[in-house]
Image (cartoon, rainbow, N blue to C red):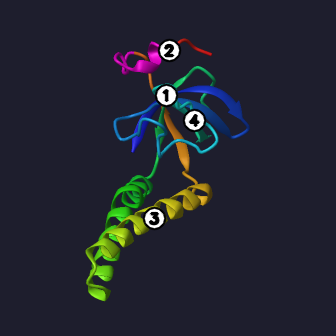
Amino acid sequence: MLQIGRVLCLEREYALVHMEKKSGCGGERCPLSSSLIDDSQSDFYTIRAWNEIGASPGDLVLVAVKDQTVLTIAFLLYIVPILSALLAYLLFRFLTASESLAIFGLFGSLGMSFLFLRRLNRKFTIEYRIVERVSSKECSTCPLLLQPRR
């Protein structure tokens, strides 16, 4: 996955890059943003990316994330809670005749899967890389051009 961002500052071989939240990002927090650097009040977030091309502050750049990483995050966020809820419901229905216990198990498994994902989020790191500079002509509708440079 490639996304356009603006380099804010450099940290040795890394750079802090200001990026726009895309439609896959939730209202509160984007799953692809860093746990430490997120501005939930805006449509943008900041990530720490390996600066393999030597971009300078203020440059518009393409930031790459492995497609497998994005698909793994989507699977964990959307599919795992649904599967765990379905399995818990079916298990409780098989073990007991009570519909209310099965529904209780369903909601319990949803809660447990969200706790699991929250714990996993603290350990999960996303490897961003700056792979190319982008000219402002190539990005004429880019919302980053409307943002003042910091």
Q: Quadrant of the N terminus?
A: top left
Q: Residue at x 35, y 16 (%)?
A: 140
Q: Earlier in the sequence, mark 4 or mark 3?
A: 4
User: For residue 137, which quarter of the picture?
Assistant: top left
Residue 6 picture location, percent across and down: 53, 25
Callout 2 touching callout 1 (CB < 8 Å): yes
- Taking the spot 32% from the left edge, 63% from the top edge, the residue there is 82
Mark before the other along the chain sequence, 3 or 1: 1
Residue linked to disc 2:
147
x, y percent for residue 121: 56, 56
Amino acid at dot 4: Asp
Viewer-nearest of discs 4 and 2 = 4
Image coords of residue 42 (percent x, y):
49, 25
Q: Residue furthest right?
A: 12
Furthest-bottom residue in this view: 95
Vertical position of residue 66 compared to residue 99: above or below: above
Closest to the camera, between mark 2 and mark 1, is 1
Query: Which mark's residue is nearer the viewer, 2 or 3?
Result: 3
Q: Which residues are magenta?
A: 137-147
Secondary structure, mark 3, is helix
Q: Residues at badges 3 and 1 in contact (C-beta under 8 Å)?
A: no
Is 141 magenta? The answer is yes
The residue indicated by pointer 4 is 38
Q: Rounded to the nearest whole Å, what is the CA distance between mark 4 and mark 2?
A: 17 Å
The reply, left or right, for residue 64 in relation to residue 58 is: left
First in sequence: mark 4 vs mark 2? 4
Residue ID for mark 3: 113
* Nearer to me, 55 or 26: 26
| Disc number placed over residue 44 in the picture, else none | 1
- Residue shown at 60% from the left, 29% from the top: 55
